[in-house]
Image (cartoon, grey):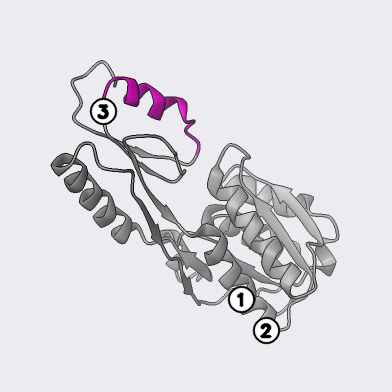
Amino acid sequence: MLSYPLEAMILRSGSLSADISEACGKLGIPVIASGRILEADGVDNVCCRNREGIAKGVEVLLAKGRRNFGFIGGPSTFAASADRRAGVVGALRTAGLTLMAEETGGFTVQSGYDAALRLQQLDRLDALVCANDAMAIGALSALREQGHLVPKDISVIGFDDIEMARWPSIQLTTLRNPIDALVEAVLDLLERRAAHPAKDPEMIWLDAEVILRATH
């Protein structure tokens, strides 16, 4: 892409390295990053408060009396996964608790299914937090196949609020990643960068919203 005469680059991925922003900087191409914070001249960022968002979801489960938590995280190359894990761990620490079990998936439905079956002490868990909706949906399937009633026996929450999470057969409780607000912020930053190419980098934070459905 860098071989084209670009006026700006929008990076929408939590797994991209800082090398891309550095390459753009050398070519004088402004960058708008979303999904991973990139600190560099000429780079503006839009990011969801992943840590605080998922902590709000954990607090919902704590208020329901859940105490034995498991977590299914995403690949270590995704910044959002680490932030969401930190949010879970922090909220539990505040409540005087720790994670009872933890597994890693690939942000896909199948990987969430497989990770749920690998969880140690699965029968003792009463809450399962997943780093995204796809893995939470896979985990729901695995739990139901194992005879666990959701949410009677165990609560499950995800993150993102993808369309599938709203399906009548799923009705996943989750944290909504504010995509519409993100797009507006990206366009706003592009306009400001075009008007003032030498301005200091800007950072816009977006808040995740708790969406209560049927799995908590």
3 or 1: tag closer to the N-terminus: 3
User: Disc 1 or disc 2, which is closer to the eye?
Assistant: 2
- Look at discs 2 and 3 and give the one toward the viewer: 3
Residue stretch in magenta: 15-28
Residue 145 image point, x, y percent: 71, 61
Residue 42, picture quadrant: top left
Looking at the image, how many numbered discs can be counted on the residues?
Answer: 3
Foreground pick, 116 / 149: 116
Examine the rendering and report whether any part of residue 145 can be seen. no
Residue 184 on the magenta span: no
Which residue: 58% across, 36% down?
A: 77
Disc on res. 29: 3
- Residue identifier under label 1: 216
Side of 193 relative to 181 (left or right): left
Disc 3 versus disc 1: distance between alpha carbons?
A: 45 Å
Residue at horizontal 45 percent and vertical 25 percent from the top? 19
* Badge 2 amino acid: Lys
Mark 1 or 2, nearer chain start: 2
The percent position of residue 203, horizontal first and vertical second, equals 37, 51
Q: Are marks 3 and 1 in contact (CB under 8 Å)?
A: no
